[in-house]
Amino acid sequence: MRKLPRGMDGTRLVVVSDIHLGPLAGTHHVGRIVDLINSVKADIVCVVGDLVDGTVAELGRFATPLADIESRYGAYFVTGNHEYYSGARAWITELRRLGLRVLQNEHVVLEHDGETLVVGGVTDYGAHHFDPAQRSDPKAAIAGAPRHAAFRLLLAHQPRSAFAAMPAGFDLQLSGHTHGGQFVPWNFLVRLQQPFTAGLHRLGSLWVYISRGTGYWGPPIRLGAPSEITAVRLVVA
């Protein structure tokens, strides 16, 4: 990253997306995911949506291992479309209780070795279809951020948020949603909806990384799109 200050060289992020916690996945499954996250010893953990497929009443007990996530500057969460199918407001309350910082068109400012890092987060791209007050807005997510901030990171569930994130002034966007296509013919359909399917891409001045996701949705099948928990290390270009 060209704008990354020397003091932030080597900053470690973990990206987790699309766990799709459901009735078939218990606390052992989530605990294993948390163990893998913690093994990276990250500075920041980014959980970028579609965590659940069910209500807090149904699945809340399975999510409890998330309270054990360890990182230097905390774990941050943004909603995906499936949170809105599952009672987003209740899940936001529950995740905050477990210690995750939920970002809803807002940001936090982190200080690292005398440098300033902004971590912003937006609600899901289609959240306004469920709650007009939840409309995704990268511009609002960066509003009021320090002008001297050396680096600006955005968490956004869907890659297509990048078209608004780039002019808003973010440097890097972390997303999921696509499952990397998961299997044929979904891999072709994803390309009709999203600008990128998986991996690292560039949109103007903005870098975008799309996780293939940690879980699955629908049939428990993945072909050519293995699941992932992603470790990202920021380095000065």
Image (tube, rainbow, N blue to C red):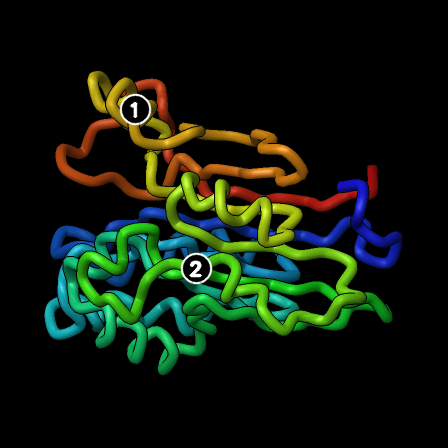
Tell me residue 24's x, y (percent): 14, 51
Q: Quadrant of the N terminus?
A: top right
Which amino acid, by three-letter code, is at mark 2? Asp
Judge whether 97 appears above or below 171 on screen: below
Tell me residue 182's x, y (percent): 28, 27
The mark found on residue 108 in the picture is none
Q: Which residue is mark 1?
A: 192
Tell me residue 127's x, y (percent): 27, 58
Q: CA distance from mark 1 to mark 2?
A: 22 Å
Q: Tell me what residue is drawn at x 72 percent, y 53 percent.
A: 11
* Callout 1: SS: helix
Tell me residue 59's x, y (percent): 17, 66
Q: Tell me what residue is drawn at x 21 percent, y 71 percent.
A: 60
- Return the disc, 1 or 2, that comes first in the chain's sequence: 2
Between residues 128 and 201, which one lies in front from this camera angle? 128
Q: Which residue is mark 2?
A: 137
Q: Tell me what residue is drawn at x 52 percent, y 65 percent.
A: 141
* Callout 2: SS: loop
The quadrant where residue 237 appears: top right
Between residues 128 and 113, which one lies in front from this camera angle? 128
Is residue 126 rendered to the left or right of residue 236? left
Q: Nearer the viewer, mark 1 or mark 2?
A: 2
